[in-house]
Image (cartoon, rainbow, N blue to C red):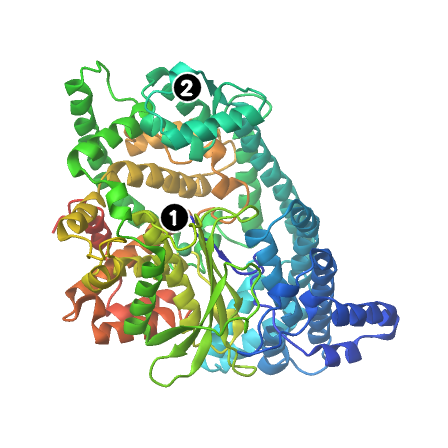
Amino acid sequence: MKIHHILKRINTSFWKIGILSVAILIFLISCQQKEKNSKITKEMGENVFLQKWTGPYGGVPAFDKMKIEDLESAVIVGMELNLTEMETIANNSEEPTFENTIVAMEKSGKVLDRVFAYYGILRSNMSTPESRKIQAGLAPKLSEFNSKILQNEKLFQRVKAVYNNSLETPLEADQQRVVELTYKGFAMRGAELDEAKKKRYAAINKELSTLYTNFSNNVLHDEENYVTYLTKDQLSGLSESFIKSAAKIAEDKDHKGTYAVTNTRSSMDPFLTYSNERELRKQVWTNYYARGDNGDEFDNNNLIAEILKLRRERVELMGYKNYAEWRLQDRMAKTPENALNLMNTVWPAAIARVKEEVADMQAVADANKDNLTIEPWDYRYYAEKVRKKKYDLNSEEVKQYLQLDKLREAMFYVAGRLFNFSFKPVPAGSVPVFQEDVKVWEVTNKDTGEHIGLWYLDPYARTGKRSGAWATTYRSHTTFDGNKTVLASNNSNFVKPAPGEPVLVSWDDASTFFHEFGHALHFFSSEVKYPTLNGGVRDYTEFQSQLLERWLPTDEVINTYLVHYKTGKPMPKSLVSKIKKAATFNQGFATTEYLASALMDMKLHLADPTNIDIDAFEKETLTQLKMPKELVMRHRTPQFGHVFSGEGYATAYYGYMWADVLTADAAEAFQEAPGGFYDKEMAEKLVKYLFAPRNSIDPAEAYRMFRGRDAKMEALMRDRGFPVKN
Ligand SMILES: [Zn+2]
């Protein structure tokens, strides 16, 4: 699974808060607030985070003038202005209309939007202990801010009135969708409840937020307190870089002279893959999969039961049968049955593949006279041996054909062929950046020269930058309030080379680079009128970016851009086919460990929580599923942070696979087209139906328009090398 994040607005507020110029706003504020206003006016004048973006390209953020000490007051002023805007809308004495309510809401929050462009940089690209402290302090205020808007009864009544009117007299299709999304955003969060129920609703949320924090803290406790320290003679099989970093970690933990394997995935995974010490593998494995499940005061089982009960009670207040039904109503899958159907279809093939993988591994172990039966702590270790034997793929050799600059040119080429975009570096110094390595390109329409936006690339790792790769927008495309052009960014963590040296990257990293660029292209393609329609749908937004990865191994890209950094020769066909073959390797393991978690997530939320015993439920469910004994769930229930340290992925973990089905099916559409991956007609459909509409049409409908039918799961099966019954 890829680490990728679209950081839109911090704290998922469901509308894209929009408008009102500050001048009008201040004029509207009542007298008692005069003192507050003068403070706001002063801040607006002096605080860079609050100021209007000036300069070329429709205005750009003043990244070169950020002052961390201004951040807190900027966020607070931004929230205050936005709340005042919402109050003004709520207290309008005129009859509620689309214009005076929905459009006004879409327009509100401009100042806060600007602040958040900077906030994201200071959180993800340029974080310091100081900025983290400020942001931790702001978190509860932001959550309170969200609740204030969601619980604004007068505001909701106006939204509801517009919604009800629209059911009788429909608006334009996209306006209708904004109204619906806005109304449902409120209703799904308890706005329709009576006073007593609202009170209970709020109390449940408060209780849940404490439980989520406790859940995370317990997992964190077990990650920090179950470190395995190795002696010098226990390092066999481990890489130089792993040993070096393990020594450093041990030293930091006052165990100088030993080597620390921490209880986290980034430490556990390579250790289990390479360590020749079977007993230690077992210990590291046991520590990791027992997180939150050690039967002590940090055990999460009871917390989870409590969380499930409260979630059920909360959705029952609103008349839903269970949490999953409530959660999935605005997702592409729409119902738990649809999501389960997908998972149950793929599951038998996945566990059948595990059997084959285990047999392959057992053969290697036997040939080696290791005298053992494959256990869960052996899976990664022997899988690696099978991989070497079967595919003989040398990752160092592959890297020599993957130069970062060439990959970037390849992405521009693909964007030109499919999207008709052209990328050109902006004149030096014309657009402020927050760090000297960040480069900016102007995106235009290849034929008309029309300006579309700016693409910021922050490629290299450095202290204070979060790990992984991600895409963001500083400004999104909208037209309802004047044409706004896109400011989008891609961020990665490549190691910065010595001057003049190329950056050589792995195949995985090259795919991820394309993936994040897919998010950027999705931002640049937007043709929506209203901010709300730029929003993402969880089981759909990863589809577009995953799909773009498929252009990396196309002949056009390989022959021109995947060239050896010394000889300039394209990657040999034999190496390309090795990479393609290796892509389906170990899919039994990957699919099974993922699906077991996704199924558990869904089943836990469909079950009656009254007397649920989490430990027993997990065991029984896995037995019913015939979970192979040689591996475990990717996230066991007591450590399943996606689902229990918040609500982000609760009954939504299936979404990765949902998007994978769309990806595999859409890729086949290109494979089947006369022009293959560069087929002109397909490219037009891709942009028109899958990228440009964002959330302005129902994703399921958009996909049907692209493909002429729904996506077929068989495409995913083929993609993973699983047999497909005809
Ligand atoms: Zn992504």
The kind of residue on which mark 2 rests is Gln
95 to 519, vertically: above or below? below
341 to 615, vertically: above or below? below
The kind of residue on which mark 1 rests is Lys
Tag 1 secondary structure: loop
Tag 2 secondary structure: helix
Cβ atoms under marks 2 and 1 closer than 8 Å: no
In the image, the residue with mark 1 has its CB under 8 Å from the nearest atom of ligand 1: yes
Give the CA distance from mark 2 to mark 1: 27 Å
126 to 644, vertically: above or below? below
Looking at the image, can residue 305 be seen? yes
Name the mark on residue 680. none
Residue labelled with disc 2: 283
Residue occupying image coordinates x 49% and y 74%: 427
Looking at the image, can residue 333 be seen? no
Residue labelled with disc 1: 2
Quadrant position of the N terminus in the picture: top left
Considering only order in the chain, which callout, 1 or 2, is on the residue closer to the N terminus?
1
Q: Quadrant of residue 601?
A: top left
In the image, the residue with mark 2 has its CB under 8 Å from the nearest atom of ligand 1: no
Q: Position of residue 495 (x, y in %)?
A: 43, 47
Could you classify mark 1 by the number of other residues whose Cα lies within 10 Å: few (under 14), some (14-19), or many (20 or more)? few
Closer-to-camera residue (491/609): 491
Q: Position of residue 86 (x, y in %)?
A: 69, 70
Closer-to-camera residue (646/27): 27
Residue occupying image coordinates x 48% and y 46%: 467
Q: Position of residue 390 (x, y in %)?
A: 16, 35
